[in-house]
Image: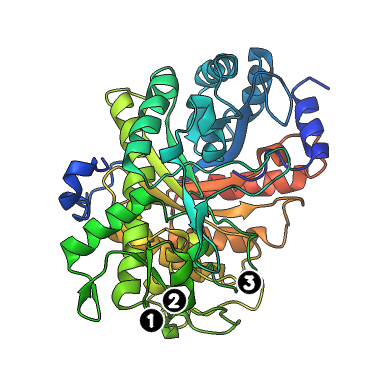
Amino acid sequence: MKELLGNSVNRRLFLKSLGMGTVLWPFPRERVLWAAAPVDVQPRLRLPRGYLLVQDVSTYNQSKFGAISTTEEARSLFGQIAGRVDAVEFGSLFYDDHDLRAHEAVAREAALQGVDLWVSTFRMLRRVRAFGAIRPEFQAQVMQADGRIVPARTLEEAGYPSETLFDVLNPEAMDWFAGAFRHKYLERMKGLLTGLFFNEDCLTYIAKQPPNTVRYDYWRNPTFSPRVLALWRAYCRQREVTQDGELVDKFPVHDPKMVANGAGRSQFVPGWNVPAEIEAGRRFVDLPRAEGVWRHWYDFTCDLFLKNWIGRLAAAANEVNRGEPGWKGTMYFGLHHWSLPYEEVQDPNFAVPQIHGWCAWGRQRGVDLAKLAGHPDIDAIICETFPPIAANLELFVAEFARITRAAGKTFGVMLHRDDDWPLKLDEEPLRWALIEKYQPTIITRFPLQHMLPGNEFYTAEGEALFARGLARYKKGPD
């Protein structure tokens, strides 16, 4: 999900068009934390070819901030898109009882009109407090550039003040949150949802987003709480991870000067070799791979994020809805830039594009795509891209497709992303050619409001062209 319905002009036009102005691991079981998840090689997610999922529909207790709140609005919206789309990403701006009453009413109208709802994790960490106060021991910690370890705080954003960050890597913290989410939301919405949609979930980066070619620094990830240190020590004991002949039992840092500020929780480990910047034209297969303790550190953080956050929520959603005829499973929707790890790229011709300079920083953001695709509670992987096609998008799509299908999971793609511009007629044939080549089951599009008459970026010609392309693809080869 992108920013909710774009800018204020888009939100007003959108509302006007509707007729209104695996189980992660308790501490005693840490010896089995790092066992590889079994891979189900037969896709369980049964969707028709060309299943169109559009982002997004949000609800709130009032009709504002681009969200809807009434049955009448829902009837108008779903009446306009029923038969044109198969599904939408579906979220609530908050999770108080009055928010959820509106959310449930909208969901019931979607069911009446045959539109599938994939509930979104977008900005979920910003909404954890709707499920209860965050205990001090459940707060994440981050490292400063000088090695100091401090409470992690989110950056200020429009409409969101800075606040302490929930520790998604803490198993006991996730015991609480997964249980609260299950009780307050999933059980209430049982029978109304189609699946769970992980939207760009990765480790929260406690700094301004760097340029596309610039590395995400490990110390700016919120991976340094006392609870994570205990898990890291258990991991190192189980794997016999050593440095200079001694078992590693502290957080690794790349600069010896950082150790003095680490309050006894860090140790110097040389050899951190992730490039500070990857210039356009550089081939991914030529880049250095982390080795030794540093390889283990990235393995550890990626595994922990997958099993503790994504795995726990996916398992809860699947368990609550097991046996529901309309439940289809879970999807991970990952931006190509920070979901694909450069370490997993196999194509020797895949280089950083001149346009946009997209890199592949997955492991630096806590996402190992191969492990994610292999998780037993993840059913589909969608490769989200940003236009134009000329920015080497085919190579990202190809790697996502290879990794997803190797795990026996359902593959999807977003090539139809048009944030603040109308659908481009010259780009549309290129998009469908790529879709035909890589044969995704799921096609995603953003944003929904561009498909509705009255929006400043809606064009009848563009929608007709998209509809023809989708119909041809759904039909399949003659």
**Could you tell me which secondary element the residue under label 3 belongs to?**
loop
The residue singled out by tag 1 in the image is: 270
Q: Earlier in the sequence, mark 1 or mark 3?
A: 1
Quick check: 443 left or right of 343?
right
Neighbours of disc 3 within 10 Å: few (<14), some (14-19), many (20+): few
Q: Compare residues 315 and 27 and report the one nearer the observer.
A: 27
Whether residue 215 is situated above or below residue 57 in the rendered picture: below
Q: Nearer the viewer, residue 478 or 367?
A: 367
Establish if 180 lies above or below 242: above
Q: On the picture, is 8 further left or further right than 336?
A: right
Residue at screen point 57% across, 84% down = 281
- Label 1: element kind: loop
Q: Which mark is residue 216?
A: none
Q: How far across and how far down the image is residue 410, in percent? A: 36, 49
Corner quadrant of residue 76: top right
Hey, which quadrant is residue 234 in on the image?
bottom left
Residue 334 in view of the camera: no
Residue under the image location 28 percent in, 29 percent down? 319
x%, y% of residue 344?
37, 71
- Amino acid tagged 1: Pro
Residue at left offset 61%, top offset 69%: 212
- Label 3, label 2: how far apart the Cα atoms are: 37 Å
Q: Nearer the viewer, mark 1 or mark 3?
A: 1
Q: Residue at x 47, y 51 (%)?
A: 141
Question: Local crowd at mark 2 within 10 Å, few (<14), some, or many (≥20)?
Answer: some
Residue under pointer 3: 390
Tag 2: amino acid: His
Q: Is residue 19 above or below residue 456?
A: above
Q: Which residue is mark 2?
A: 254
- Viewer-closest of 92 and 74: 92
